[in-house]
Image: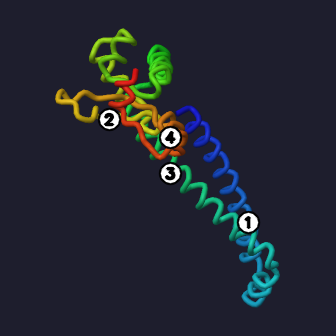
Amino acid sequence: MRELIIEENELRARIKQLQESIRSLEDQVRCHHETATPMADQADIEDISPGEKEEISDLSDNVMDIDRRVHILDKRLRGIENRMGRPISEKVRNRISRLKELLIEYDGAQTFKRLRSDLKVNPSQFSYLIGILDKRIFEIVSLPGDKRNQKMLRLKSHNKSQRGSEGDSGEEVTDAEAKAER
C-alpha cells in the first residue's frame, strides 16, 4: 500500500511538471499570437517547427496518460483502504507470515481448524486474518468429499510448482490424497 502511495505522489509531481511545461508552451504561443497581426499569426503558426508541434502533442499525451494512471492508482488505493478499513498492524503481518510458513510446512495446504490451532488465535481473529489475505497468493477451497464442508487454505504459488513436477508423471494428486499420505 505504501508503494502505491509513493507511486501516486511521484505521478502527481510528474503531472505538475508536465502541466507547467504545457502552460509555458501555451504562454509562448499566446504571447506570439497576441503580438502578431492577422497575417503574422499565420506566419507564427507556420514558424513552429514540426518537432515543436510533436513535442507539444507528446507533452499533452503524457499528461493525459499520467493523469489516467493517477486515477487508476487512486481507485486501487481507495479499494484497498475500503476493504481493509484500517492499516494492518505488525502483529497481523507476523501472523500472515507465520501462516505462510505453516502452509509451506504442510506442503502448501491445510484445514482452517488446524491452522487456527497452530496460530493459537480465536475464531474471530482467524476470520479477520483470512479476510485480509492477498487472494493472489492464498486461495480458499473446500475439502473434496468432506460431509462437514471443511475449508482449506492453500498457497497458490506452491500449488503451481507442485503441479509442474507432477505434470511429468501425468498424474495429479488431490488435496484429500495429499492429506491421507501425511
Front position among marks 2 and 4: 4
Q: Earlier in the sequence, mark 1 or mark 3?
A: 1
Q: Position of residue 97 (x, y in %)?
A: 50, 20
Above or below, comparing residue 152 to residue 24 in the picture? above
Q: Earlier in the sequence, mark 3 or mark 2?
A: 3
Q: Earlier in the sequence, mark 1 or mark 4?
A: 1
Q: Position of residue 119 (x, y in %)?
A: 39, 12
Front position among marks 1 and 2: 2
Q: Position of residue 89 (x, y in %)?
A: 46, 18
Q: Quadrant of residue 45?
A: bottom right
Mark 2 sits on what residue? Answer: 141
Q: Earlier in the sequence, mark 3 or mark 4?
A: 3
| Three-letter code for the amino acid on which mark 2 is drawn | Val
Mark 3 sits on what residue? Answer: 71
Mark 3 touches mark 4? (CB < 8 Å): no
What numbered label is drawn on residue 166?
4
Q: CA distance from mark 1 to mark 3?
A: 25 Å
Q: Secondary structure at mark 3?
A: helix
Mark 3 touches mark 2? (CB < 8 Å): no
| Three-letter code for the amino acid on which mark 3 is drawn | His
Mark 1 sits on what residue? Answer: 25
Q: Earlier in the sequence, mark 1 or mark 2?
A: 1
Above or below, comparing residue 96 to residue 74 in the picture? above
For this rendering, which residue is in front, 7 or 145?
145
Q: Secondary structure at mark 1?
A: helix
| Three-letter code for the amino acid on which mark 1 is drawn | Leu
Residue 93 visible, this angle: no
